[in-house]
Amino acid sequence: MEKAEVVAVLERIGEMLEILGENKFKCLAYQNAARMLAAAPQSLGELVESGQLGRMKGIGAALEEKITTLARTGKLPYYDELAARVPSGLLEMLAIPGFGPKKAKAVWEELGVTTIGELEYACRENRLVHLPGFGEKTQDKVLAGIEFLRRHAGRVLYPVAEKVAGEVFPLIEKHKACLRAAVAGSLRRRRETVADIDIVAATGDAKALMAHVAGLSLAREVLGHGDTKTSIRTESGMQIDVRAVSDREYPFALHHFTGSKEHNVLMRTRAKAQGLKMSEYGLFRGDKLILCADEPEIFEVLGLAYIPPELREGLDEIELAETGDLPELIEEKDIRGVFHVHSEYSDGRGTLEELAHAGAAAGYEYLGVADHSKSAAYARGLSPERVRQQQAELARVNAKKLGCTLLSGIESDILADGSLDLILIRWRCLISSASVHSRFNLSEAEQTKRIIAAVQTRFAPCWGIRPDGCYSRARLIRSTWTRCCRRAGGRVVVEINAHPQRLDLDWSWARARAWGLGGDQS
Ligand code: DGT
Ligand code: CA
């Protein structure tokens, strides 16, 4: 093993010991040894073989032995032992600027957070504010640090990419050589995360349009520049691929580069079965192009209803389009209200009146206030007494008729045995949800049993458990999940937050039919 690698291992051991709450001097010993080793002018081999290592300041017999083992074998059982005890996500967190082992230990112990995604979510839920040694400023810094990391880690969340596309796309579309253009790829399919932005443009002068793209002032870097494709990187770090095609090819190119790859394969297979050939250049019968003015015409030629990009994931969309059974997508205007918001009573930021105003401004008819219940002490969960106070205030706010009705609810903790923290009906909550916020470390079987018990509780009509999620740790497999829903007999509403970093219920699970369940259980 090289010296730099050994230094890294020693540093990591120091960090792991600190996360595990080991004696401060022991942690420091590893960090010092790493520093000493890095600063020594000799090579690692020289230090080890000459015996100089043991004479270095701060390197005692135990450390000398470990470094020697590492240098000779490239392995260290002690390191593996520690690594097995510390969740790897906690170590990844140390890459967040300003986030050290002490903080990692705190979020792990106090909040059960073990991945960067969970940490981000905890910040957004305002949970770091109340941790000893943290505060609002630290929480904001952690969030900014996570965003920084993510920008450099390949994929970004949908809204981030959407914003970048919103800046770049108009500059391309309005160029005089551009006949029509659209954003394609995962962004058009509205995937939760996006790797790069794909834009397809129809033009009669590809050269001019591509030169325009390469010359855009917001291009920090031109990654590739040709007559049909130009790739740039913006200041934000996002890559944008722009493809220039003829107007005749445009619908086919748009369809192809919208993807997904899996959907494209299914479409090609279908075309083939009809004696046609499909590619990004067109739909062909023999050598003859079948003209299509736009994407809907392509689907029409293949005997399919128009499949919205959001459904083009290579699941069952082709069959559904064939029989006219595609689900209708929910649009923002369809949303009449939100059932689960927190107020300043627990870990939210707004007063009840502020919430009512915000709800009205968003055009919502109702807003379900469902603060944490008392067991969620870290979030200042509500005692029955506080629930009553809140209900009284809520009635006063509603009497002002601000345009959005507040509904009384509670997010009740699911206790270790699966029972609920508050028997909701007693407090006349109209809406309620039940979530796991503690005892994350139960075994998978115990956790699953707990959740099934909670789902069967009569008083929790809305289920706020993340079946696949980091909080529940239940990692329910689909069959268990199905069983839960069946047992609940359609009485339970499942909350789909679908925040990708939180490992919430995946959107595809919501479509029960796709995996062989009848509509009733969906
Ligand atoms: P991303 O960029 O990882 O967020 O996801 P996409 O879906 O935007 O993937 P990308 O940018 O690699 O490619 C854009 C589309 O181009 C993709 O959704 C489908 C199409 N495509 C790319 N490579 C292939 C391929 O090898 N076969 C087929 N059939 N289509 C492809
Ligand atoms: Ca893409």
Image (spheres, rainbow, N blue to C red):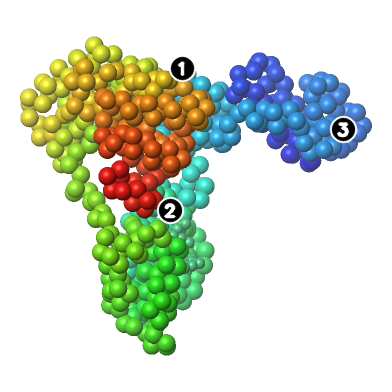
- The kind of residue on which mark 1 rests is Pro
**Tag 1 and tag 2, C-beta contact below 8 Å:** no
Q: Which residue position is annotated with label 1? A: 132
Tell me how far mark 2 sits from mark 3, CA to CA.
48 Å
Q: Position of residue 495 (x, y in %)?
A: 31, 37
Q: Position of residue 334 (x, y in %)?
A: 19, 48
Tell which residue pokes out farthest to the bottom in this image.
Answer: 287
Query: Cβ(mark 2) to ligand 1 < 8 Å?
Result: yes
Tell which residue pokes out farthest to the top in this image.
Answer: 385
**Tag 1 and tag 3, C-beta contact below 8 Å:** no
Q: Secondary structure at mark 3?
A: helix
Sequence-first disc among 1 and 3: 3
**Tag 2 and tag 3, C-beta contact below 8 Å:** no
Q: Nearer the viewer, residue 478 or 415?
A: 478
Q: Which residue position is annotated with label 2? A: 194
Q: Secondary structure at mark 1?
A: loop
Snapshot quadrant of residue 61: top right
Name the residue rendered at 22%, 20% in the picture: 425
Sequence-first disc among 2 and 3: 3
Sequence-first disc among 1 and 2: 1
Tell me how far mark 1 sits from mark 3, CA to CA.
43 Å
Instruction: Say if 38 sits above or below 195 in the image.
Output: above
Q: Residues within 10 Å of mark 2 (few under 14, many from 20)?
A: many
> Left of 154 or right of it: where is 264?
left
Q: Which residue position is annotated with label 3? A: 48
Q: Nearer the viewer, mark 1 or mark 2?
A: 2
Name the residue rendered at 37%, 26% in the picture: 453
Quadrant of the image for the N terminus? Answer: top right
Q: Position of residue 324 (x, y in %)?
A: 25, 64
Instruction: Say if 487 sits above or below 19 in the image.
Output: below
Quadrant of the image for the C terminus? Answer: top left
